[in-house]
Amino acid sequence: MRFAHISDLHIGKRLHEVSLLDDQAYILEEIRRILRDEKPDAVLIAGDIYDKSAPSAEAVRLFDDFLSGLASDGQTVFVISGNHDSAARVAYGGRIMERSGVHLSAPAYEGGVRPVMLTDGHGPVDIYLLPFVKPVHVSLAFPDEKIESYTDALRVAVERMAVNPKRRSVLVAHQFVTGAVRSDSEEVSVGGLDNVDAAVFAPFSYVALGHIHRPQNIGSPRVRYSGTPLKYSFSEAADGKSVTMAELDGKGEVSLRTVPLTPKRDLREVKGTYEELMKKENYEGTATEDYLHIVLTDEEDVPDAMRKLKTVYPNVLRLDYDNVRTRSGAVVEAAPEAEEKSPLALAEEFYALQNGRPMSGAQTEYLRRMIGTVWEDEA
């Protein structure tokens, strides 16, 4: 039996205050195209459908379009809620959607996770949908159990599923499994208290996980994070995004492969001097519309650099410098006589302390004009 595994759509997410809805609509259509080509027996969507528990109308409409499209393509779909989602909102209309082959996790964890059975030439495969759970959720469902950690909670939740060891089974879950490599775009629990030991998933032939944004296996191909379909932080700039294709043979052994995803706009880091980056021969023919983190290596700060760079690279989201000053980590201490000095003199001293050299004449004149403009506006 063949499964397509995706997760962490985070529909409605904003990156550096820029809406990604257009990019998300593009990549979801790309996923539909891949699924039409691959023709899996089921599509597993492992949580964090939305970026917020109260998503915008536009975000809800986009996911509705995606699910409706999958159903019209004849796909059987399994969806769970993640830690960013409202489980009740994701589950809304679930009984009606089942008629179209779309299966949603429960609106709240109450202890009863019953499988949906699929069948292939080797027999049945049981699909279990476990929404994101915390220890308190499982403790409320099973007050007699001793639950002191996320591992305890998942162990009890899995035990109460009573998985049939003689049948192939798949779990769709959204948790942080110990050993997973995180990125900057994830919600982090202080001290790693949300860690779950992968051993709790031993009864399953395949565990389709969400929550971690980098695609990776945990210990073996049997426990897998598919990762996000888009890059949601610059720490993921070098990552490749994909749809995971998992195939179970008759004995429950799993084999994996990935189908790459190509975004409408990539998320990249670009480094060089201001002059190098603004030369037409250096940027012509490149993907200047991508979302960029630009690192300037100029020793002197470029006045109004962000605005100027955006004339060539309209989607610059972040600007930093890498030079002697930034590498030295110099710290400026305020002088006791600071109140007696002019703003220009203070700025000149600050610049010299930070950069190890005085301002140039052009920089001093530029700053003098800016100070004058500010004072005129205040007057």
Image (tube, rainbow, N blue to C red):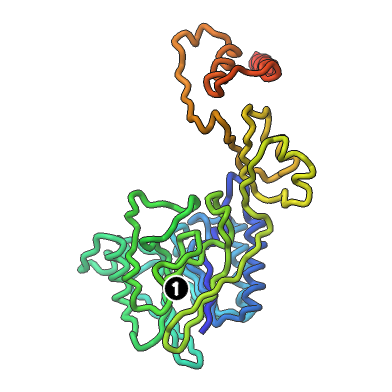
Q: Residue at x 50, y 71 (%)?
A: 79
Pick the residue in front: 189 or 108: 189
Tell me the quarter of the picture where residue 165 sits. Answer: bottom left
Tell me the quarter of the picture where residue 193 sits. Answer: bottom left
- Classify mark 1: residues with Cα within 10 Å, few (<14), some (14-19) or many (20+): some
Pick the residue in front: 1 or 161: 1
User: What's the residue type where badge 1 is placed?
Assistant: Pro
Left or right, 286 with respect to 356, comes to right
**Outermost residue toward the top?**
340
Q: Residue at x 62, y 72 (%)?
A: 68
Q: Residue at x 31, y 61 (%)?
A: 150
Q: Is residue 97 visible in this depiction of the protein?
A: no
For label 1, the SS is strand
Question: Which residue lies under the disc numbered 1?
Answer: 221
Q: Position of residue 330 (x, y in %)?
A: 48, 26
Q: Position of residue 372 (x, y in %)?
A: 67, 14
Q: Is residue 228 above or below residue 170?
A: above
Q: Position of residue 359 (x, y in %)?
A: 63, 18
Q: Position of residue 337 (x, y in %)?
A: 47, 8
Q: Is residue 356 above or below residue 133?
A: above
Pick the residue in front: 212 or 180: 180
Pick the residue in front: 58 or 148: 148
Q: Is residue 313 above or below residue 153?
A: above
Tell me the quarter of the picture where residue 303 sits. Answer: top right
Quadrant (top left/top right/bottom left/bottom right) for the C terminus: top right
How many numbered circles are shown? Answer: 1
